Image: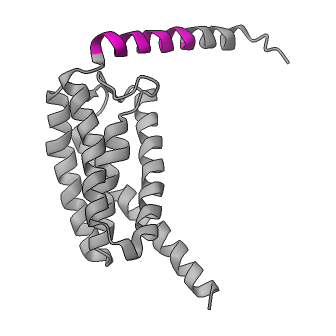
């Protein structure tokens, strides 16, 4: 079935041009730059450290937390980029407009460590509040300074509650799922 919608066809044409332009920008002005190397390290090193220190007895629980969190982080990042709240002048890969190294590396790994080490709610929330402060007011400004992250219609302060709430939401979901599994297996 063909689509005769001219607006849709125009969007597809512009999307194709954008993809080509993104690839050209990536190859000519992004790949192997200082920022690209930082992003590569930021993706790989946290996972190496995580693998060394993860509680292997609870690895599936921790990975479930991390996988659900990663999906939420990616959705929020896509939403922010699509709505011109922020952008990323440097990318690890040209195919996605999100910051893969941060979304799938640093953020998820740090949160998985907090989930592993702070099982009770009060310490978990406190630890995530401290992490949210660090991410919002130290890490984000650093990435802006490094020209990796560009604030368009966003402020660091807006990120602060989101870092906390997403960690709480995913912990509530994972703990609830595992509790239901435990109850149903009795």
Decide if residue 99 is on the left or right side of residue 176. Answer: left
| Image height of 107 relative to 173, above or below | above
Q: Which residues are magenta?
A: 15-29
In the depicted view, which residue is nearer to us: 167 or 28? 28
- Give how far across and how far down residue 141 sits, in percent: 16, 36
- Name the residue rendered at 24%, 47% in the picture: 45
Which percent across, then down, holds residue 21? 44, 9
Q: Which of these two is toward me, 60 or 136? A: 60
Q: Residue at x 21, y 56 (%)?
A: 131
Image quadrant where one finds the N terminus: top right
Query: In the image, is residue 179 above or below residue 84?
Result: below
Residue 60 percent across, percent down from the top left: 46, 68
Q: Main secondary structure of the magenta part?
A: helix
The spot of residue 26 in percent (x, y) is: 35, 16
* Residue 25 sits inside the magenta stretch: yes
Residue shown at the point (17%, 51%) measured from the top left: 134
């Amino acid at each position: 079935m063909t689509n005769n919608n001219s607006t849709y066809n125009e969007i597809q044409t512009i999307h194709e041009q954008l993809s080509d332009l993104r690839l050209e920008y990536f190859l000519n002005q992004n790949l192997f730059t200082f920022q690209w190397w930082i992003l590569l390290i930021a993706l790989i090193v946290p996972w190496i450290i995580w693998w060394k220190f993860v509680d292997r007895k609870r690895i599936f629980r921790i990975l479930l937390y991390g996988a659900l969190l990663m999906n939420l982080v990616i959705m929020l990042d896509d939403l922010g980029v699509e709505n011109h709240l922020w952008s990323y002048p440097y990318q690890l890969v040209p195919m996605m407009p999100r910051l893969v190294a941060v979304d799938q590396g640093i953020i998820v790994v740090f949160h998985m460590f907090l989930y592993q080490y702070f099982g009770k709610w009060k310490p978990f929330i406190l630890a995530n509040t401290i992490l949210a402060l660090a991410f919002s007011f130290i890490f984000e400004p650093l990435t802006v300074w490094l020209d990796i992250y560009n604030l368009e219609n966003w402020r660091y302060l807006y990120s602060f509650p989101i870092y906390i709430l997403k960690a709480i939401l995913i912990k509530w979901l994972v703990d609830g799922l595992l509790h239901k599994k435990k109850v149903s297996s009795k």
